[in-house]
Image (cartoon, grey):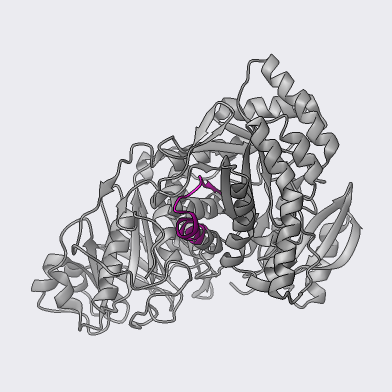
Amino acid sequence: MQVYCESLFSYKRLPTRVVKVGNLFIGGDNPIRIQTMTTTDTMDTLATVEQTIRCINAGAELVRITAPSKKEAENLKAIKSELLKRGYTTPLVADIHFTPNAAEIAATIVEKVRVNPGNYVDKKKFEQIDYSDQEYAEEIERIRERFSPLVKICKQHGTAMRIGTNHGSLSDRIMSRYGDTANGMVESAMEFLRIARSEDYHQIILSMKSSNPLVMVQAYRLLILHMMQEFGECYPLHLGVTEAGDGEDGRIKSAIGIGSLLEDGIGDTIRVSLTEDPEFEIPVCKDLVKRYQNSNNQQTALISDALKLPYSAFEYKRRQTNELLTIGSKHVPVVVADFMEAESIATTDLQAIGYTYNSTTDKWNIADAAADFIYSHHKLVDFNLPGTLRVICNYTTWLQTNEREKYFPLFDVNNFETALEKSDTLNFIACDVSEDVSKLLPLIKEDNTIVLCIYSKAEKAMQQMRRFVLELMNQKINCPVIISVESMHTQVDEQLIHFSATAGGLFLDGMGDGIWLINNPDKMTNNKVSGRTYLTVKNNHQFLNNTSFSILQAVRTRISKTEYISCPSCGRTLFDLQETTAKIRKVTNHLKGLKIAVMGCIVNGPGEMADADFGYVGSGPGKITLYKGKEVVKRNVNSEVAVDELINLLKENDVWIEAGSLVP
């Protein structure tokens, strides 16, 4: 099976060319660079300068500014001049869509231009056209004629370029031949890269962005493979999950997509796209990058000297496992709520993990995001549990209960081997894969009652857990695996990143049948982002439960809530994106499984909504266009009534449910 990097089982940074962007070097052994994008009107010079300075002071090493037309591209000169006057030399990046002439102007002013191969030359009309090989070649030649002038200008002025493919804005030509796929994303970029190389121009960085972390990760892996096969080298990679959203969900989705690639040594510069002011993206970027700043090329603990890769890293397929009650096989991954540190467990404690007890009716209300198991450690629960909830407890505690249909034992590697009694149905084994656990494998190979709860105390935990699961696959051991991650970080963002990058990367490769997150709330401090506090210690169980379900939703293995695909805003945005997203979220957050895109302008409109069911897109000052999928259904709606019109659209398509009518 083909591999995309040398870091599947040990950390090694992917070797890439070094690209100079102004006074900054990207790629090779240089640090992973942090960048963001302004949200101001590019024609408002002072506002853009002030926001750029805030981003630089927060830690941005590059700042991107939109240039949707010639006038904005020309005004980049005034912005750069004012920044230099104030002593700021941070490289600027011009963001270009649709307008080659704007790109050519910008390339003579700023240090880098970003072009989207999906709309730089091609126009997207959502048409299916069958191209013959000759017609396709003629289209490539047309692209060469339009793109080569920019390449020559960049080469002449020493300007770098990012060829930035977006999943949602693939051209009709690419879609017609490759479909809405990671392969299509890669080929879209490779066409432009080949043209640049033919001009002996190599100051290029590439990106493969999607709002779906699974598609994004697969596209980067494929791009690396294609570059190595065709050119024998890799260009630097800019990582990002586009339209990630805001709050915890935006951080989790970004950490899964970006973090899982960084875990493999992939990525030379990153941008976390949040629907928040750009300076608030920077701390999240820093938390992501610092996990790898002191990572030298490291070898993880090995189970065997050589492992075959028994799955494709370029397409999703869940590992085949046994079915044990609600775990494994075709069941959605389960969520384990950790009550290890609780002195006792009361009915009110379960509300934080999705179970609300009504003492009047003696009934439980169960939320969509309700945990499937609790780990009680050495405690037994002294009330009747809701029907869907089961308890994992220590082996010695399990021996004390007669409720064997509700309680199941957790062993370690040693006491499992010596235990005199085991459950006939379900036995959990906690397994630290940073240690030698090879003696366990023969014991469980033919035992169809085993669920492994794997974790690692080592720095590169994800790679060790991946290696262990691959060993199970190669030995044809089909016991389900619960991914357990413990974070001892003190800040919320750090914990979200740790949980998401470690567990999310494994779920993207189909390796998890459950998730179990653990932290130490006594060491945590509240952190404020955009004036909001995301966590208090008293809600720690709720935080862990929400994070677990958000990770599973982001990797598309368990859908428990509405998903919002929201662009991070820029100078093209035609309404208050943060306020509007919050308003739409407030009235639609009960519509489980629905994907709603909120886009600031047509650039991030129908194309970037590739993964959405419905879209709300700025089409002019005070005007909104509503989409079903990629089809316009209501054009130029007054923004004052546009949210109500969105609700009407959902009703017309029979996906609206009144919030008060939902049964928890």
Front residue of 232 and 28: 232
Which part of the image, by quadrant, shows the N terminus?
A: bottom left
Give the image location of residue 525, x and y in percent.
Answer: 44, 37
Q: Quadrant of residue 566?
A: bottom right
Residue 89 found in image quarter = top right
- Looking at the image, residue 573 sits to the left or right of residue 410; the answer is right
* Residue placed most toward the observer, 201 or 15: 201
* Residue 363 position within the rendered picture, expressed as x and y whole percent measured from the top left: 50, 75
Near-viewer residue (168 or 353): 168
The range drawn in magenta is 220-246
Q: Quadrant of the C terminus?
A: bottom right
Establish if 72 lies above or below 331: above
Q: Nearer the viewer, residue 320 or 454?
A: 320
Query: Is residue 236 highlighted in magenta?
Result: yes
Q: Which residue does the image show at 72% across and 67% down from the upper left? A: 173
Image x and y of residue 94, in percent = 70, 38
Instruction: Look at 85% across and 35% down and name the residue there.
Output: 71
Q: Check residue 235 for magenta coloring.
A: yes
Q: Is residue 575 left or right of residue 198?
A: right
Residue depicted at 36% across the width and 39% down the height: 523
Tell me if residue 524 can be seen: yes
Query: Does residue 425 sit above or below 430 in this rendering?
Result: below
